Image (cartoon, rainbow, N blue to C red):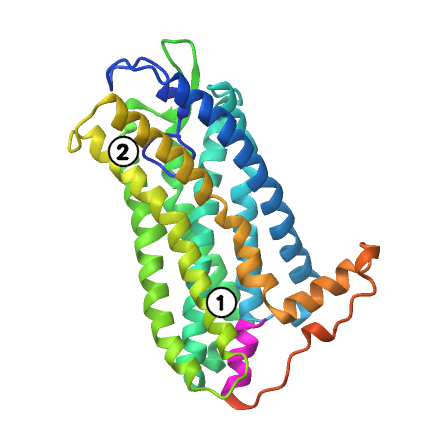
Amino acid sequence: MSEGNNTPYDYSSYYDEGADYPPTNFSDVKDFSQVFLTTLYSLVFALGFIGNGLVVYVVVKYRNQSNLTDICLFNLALSDLLFVFTLPFYSHYARVGQWTFGDFMCRLLSGSHQTGFFSSIFFMVVMTLDRYVIIVHAHRVTRYRTMRAAIILTMLIWMLSMFVSLPDFIFTQEIQEKSQKTRCYYLEESKVWERYNLFTTNVLGLVIPLLVMVGCYSRIIPTLVNMRTSKKHRIVKLIICIVVAFFLLWAPYNISRFLKFLQEKGKIPRNDTWDKNLRVSVVVTEAFAYTHCCLNPIIYAFVGQKFMRRALKLLKNFVPGIRNLPDSSFRRSSVISKSSEVTSTYIM
């Protein structure tokens, strides 16, 4: 875990009088990050676990009726669950200012955190491309959207995510500092992988997914507007929410990390005020970026009428208060031809 990779920053290093930056009193930054990160990580863990856990449960319960969209939704939820399971450990790390879980957990959690992050992004990209081909090239690709293709695609994405995250499994480890604090960090001779992580997180985690979303949805929206479906305006709003939420939550974090990198390389002047503001910016934008895993179930699942019907049917067996809730609110009107396929793809 380091200032250059996508796992939560090694905040303990911010408060040491190291040789990488002049002695500055960061006690106020430390106090802020301890409270802020502990609170946000705990909240993200709770909401992310509940939301994504429900998605996994619903898809597994109705696995006999699954299609490619359901498979991607299931794996997106698994990715987010893998991601949020690491947050309690990093919450403790930020709170006490040192790593206390040992070398094996350092490597495992760093790699798992990265794998969950990249697989979540990759499955969102796949869902975007799937919607694009279904709407814009429906007649050409329908026969290829089979369960076998979904399984193969899923395996490839998980393998790619683990491959991209491999340096975190290998090169992060528990390190004893001169200050007697234990950190989960890259070895000094492995610092090249910090740049690798900065590059992959910015390019594979933000730039390419954002370009794919903007490119695909800019073609999808005009096609939807010309379709005979009563739900086209709702679908367009959903598309806008997907792109805007992704950009607003992840872009500030990536920009803050890139500015921190430029500062370390001497491209940006260093002074106490700028240094403190940049460190606080990294802390805040990172925590809010991680809330995206809580929004994924809402954006991709709970807005879908098919999913909501299934979820409510299951919840009625466990939550007495919603047993009398009518199902008519979630009935989908039938739409013929291509519009029906588009509606079923978005309003799942």
Mark 1 touching mark 2, by CB under 8 A?
no
Tag count: 2
Closest to the observer, 198 or 147: 198
Q: Give the image location of residue 191, x and y in percent.
A: 27, 29
- Answer few, some or many: residues within 10 Å of disc 2's Cα (few below 14, many 20 plus, some between 14 and 19): many
Magenta stretch, main secondary structure, is helix
Closest to the observer, 3 or 27: 27
Q: Which residue is mark 1?
A: 238
On the question of residue 122 being in view, the answer is yes
Q: Give the image location of residue 287, x and y in percent.
A: 46, 38
Question: Given the image, on which type of amino acid does mark 1 rest?
Answer: Leu
The quadrant of the picture occupied by the C terminus is bottom right
Q: Is residue 70 left or right of residue 277?
A: right
Q: Give the image location of residue 151, x and y in percent.
A: 52, 64
Give the magenta-colored segment's residue range. 338-348
Q: Is residue 284 one of those drawn in magenta?
A: no
Q: CA distance from mark 1 to mark 2?
A: 34 Å
Mark 2 or mark 1, which is nearer the start of the sequence?
1
Tell me what residue is drawn at x 36 percent, y 20 percent: 13
> From the viewer's perspective, is residue 114 above or below residue 209?
above
Q: Which residue is mark 2?
A: 260
Closest to the observer, 205 or 229: 229
SS for callout 2: helix
